[in-house]
């Protein structure tokens, strides 16, 4: 049996394919993100490991042997002691406390020094700044690990990292495909402090006691890749003509290429590996559905569905409100961690309907920013765009995004695309005909066409949004 598991920001998602009924069987286990102080976002490794064991027990009666393909959120880091026990929490992508270390590296070496080697611009989210921050404040640090490599260690006894997640750290040379020695020297670090690099298709046997505890004779791990690139893989968007737009907790736009693609005019995009031969050009934001989490709690909405319903009572443009939804800082295109959320145009006549609408539109404008960056850097416009992530569950919200982009968006007949991508990468590792499986089982189910009228209205609102963004950029950099 094959199982695909996605280690997400808010929980685990696991899938296997029911050959008899020709459909995916899906399970989920949620866990918490903690925000103990401003700029901090962490998770508890033991809570995630417990969730992993719990979700695997759902499959124990189905077969005696299981192959697990892994997907994982990018950019997490935790420090381990000499017994490989965590001495920090898992510091996730939304954590920005290392901004001072990032600014030090930028001033001394420049962002392009790191970007041209690793495909990752300097940012507090990436490992260079995080490693410096941890080393200044934490004792007994012997190893650094992502949450996925830590879980694989707990299962197999081997601390390994695959090419994709390694390339999302900011200390991995995407051209040589190894840990970058010059960057490690700058950080006062070395390869001994890091996991061993392995292929995404490596097959690693689990410890016998772990397998028996969960009711299996044997468990094998396929390290897989990062969640974003596997979302592309899971819907068959594995060429430079098909882009994937994802809006979940965060958001991204991604395109596959057979070589590294970097931004020669700036650092608006990143470039990660998928495997030994494939690269993914992408643009990402910190503020997707996590902004709706804030809105729900702050304005006492009962559910996300209520936010959507209320937002649709406000017209296009939210009666003049423009929301710059940078509640968790900025990634692409300028990587300004200090950027904050701003709502412009509020009057006593506005209601929470308009604020809800401006929130959805503001996230949509960020998606447009990402897509425009991808087009500029790659020199091409994708012929097809597939939408994935939680926003596809709302026909109203995805319609807003389609109208803002002026692009047709396609939705497949699947959910949990990253977990399905992990399932497929395990199939590929085991030479089990993944291409035919993809063609036979993953289909476009819904097509969302943009409204020409609304697109023209949004072009005007987007110009105002961009004007305000540029106007405030230096303010946030300075203050």
Image (cartoon, helix red, strand yellow):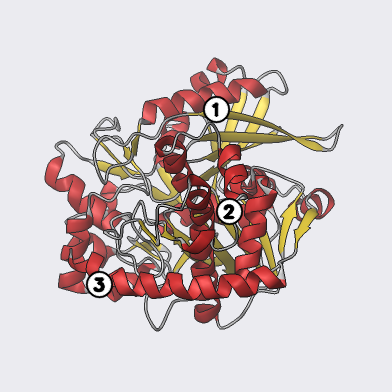
Residue identified by numbered label 3: 474
> Is disc 3 placed on a helix, strand or loop?
helix
Mark 3 or mark 1, whichever is nearer to me: 3
Viewed as shown, does residue 277 lie left or right of 34?
right
Nearer the N terminus, badge 1 or badge 2? 1
Q: CA distance from mark 1 to mark 2?
A: 35 Å
Nearer the N terminus, badge 3 or badge 1? 1
Q: CA distance from mark 3 to mark 2?
A: 32 Å
Residue identified by numbered label 2: 314
- Counting from the top left corner in percent of width and height, residue 260 is at 49, 73
Residue identified by numbered label 1: 29
Which residue is found at the position 46% from the left and 29% from the top?
31
Q: Quadrant of residue 255?
A: bottom right
Mark 3 or mark 2, whichever is nearer to me: 2
Are the two marked residues, 3 and 2, in contact with CB atoms closer than 8 angstroms? no
On the rendered image, what quadrant is the C terminus found in?
A: bottom left
Q: Relative to the observer, which residue lies in front, 214 or 337?
A: 337
Mark 1 or mark 2, whichever is nearer to me: 2
* Residue 210 against residue 235 in the figure, above or below: above
- Counting from the top left corner in percent of width and height, residue 45 is at 37, 31
- Counting from the top left corner in percent of width and height, residue 268 is at 41, 72
């Amino acid at each position: 049996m094959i199982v695909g598991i996605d280690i997400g920001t808010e929980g685990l998602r696991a899938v296997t394919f029911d050959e008899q009924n020709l459909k995916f069987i899906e399970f989920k286990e949620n866990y918490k993100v903690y925000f103990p102080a401003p700029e901090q976002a962490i998770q508890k490794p033991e809570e995630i490991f417990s969730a992993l064991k719990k979700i695997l027990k759902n499959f124990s009666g189905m077969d005696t042997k299981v192959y697990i393909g892994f997907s994982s959120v990018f950019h997490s880091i935790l420090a381990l002691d000499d017994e490989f026990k965590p001495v920090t929490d898992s510091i996730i992508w939304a954590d920005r406390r290392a901004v001072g270390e990032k600014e030090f590296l930028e001033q001394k070496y420049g962002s392009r020094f790191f970007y041209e080697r690793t495909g990752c611009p300097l940012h507090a989210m990436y490992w260079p700044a995080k490693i410096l921050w941890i080393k200044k404040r934490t004792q007994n640090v012997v190893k650094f690990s992502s949450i996925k490599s830590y879980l694989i260690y707990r299962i197999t006894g081997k601390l390994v990292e695959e090419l994709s997640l390694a390339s999302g750290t900011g200390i991995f040379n995407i051209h040589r495909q190894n840990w970058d020695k010059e960057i490690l020297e700058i950080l006062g670090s070395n390869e001994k402090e890091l996991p061993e690099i392995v292929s995404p298709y490596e097959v690693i046997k689990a410890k016998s006691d772990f397998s028996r505890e969960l009711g299996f004779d044997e468990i094998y791990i396929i390290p897989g890749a990062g969640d974003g690139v596997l979302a592309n893989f899971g819907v068959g968007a594995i060429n430079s003509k098909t882009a994937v737009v994802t809006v979940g907790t965060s958001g991204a736009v991604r395109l596959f290429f057979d070589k590294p693609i970097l931004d020669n005019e700036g650092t608006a995009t990143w470039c990660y590996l998928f495997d030994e031969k494939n690269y993914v050009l992408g643009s990402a934001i910190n503020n997707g559905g996590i902004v709706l989490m804030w809105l729900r709690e702050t304005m006492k909405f009962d559910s996300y569905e209520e936010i959507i319903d209320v937002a649709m009572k406000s017209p296009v443009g939210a009666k003049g409100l423009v929301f710059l939804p940078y509640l968790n800082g900025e990634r692409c295109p300028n990587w300004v961690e200090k950027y904050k959320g701003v709502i412009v145009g509020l009057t006593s006549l506005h209601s929470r309907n308009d604020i809800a609408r401006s929130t959805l539109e503001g996230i949509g404008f960020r998606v447009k920013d990402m897509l425009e960056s991808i087009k500029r850097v790659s020199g091409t416009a994708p012929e097809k765009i597939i939408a994935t992530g939680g926003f596809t569950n709302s026909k109203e919200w995805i319609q807003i995004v389609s109208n803002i982009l002026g692009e047709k968006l396609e939705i497949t007949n699947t959910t949990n695309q990253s977990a399905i991508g992990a399932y497929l990468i395990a199939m590929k590792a085991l030479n089990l005909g993944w291409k035919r499986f993809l063609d036979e089982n993953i289909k476009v189910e819904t097509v969302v066409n943009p409204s020409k009228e609304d697109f023209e209205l949004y072009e005007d609102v987007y110009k105002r949004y961009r004007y305000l963004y540029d106007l405030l950029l230096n303010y946030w950099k300075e203050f």
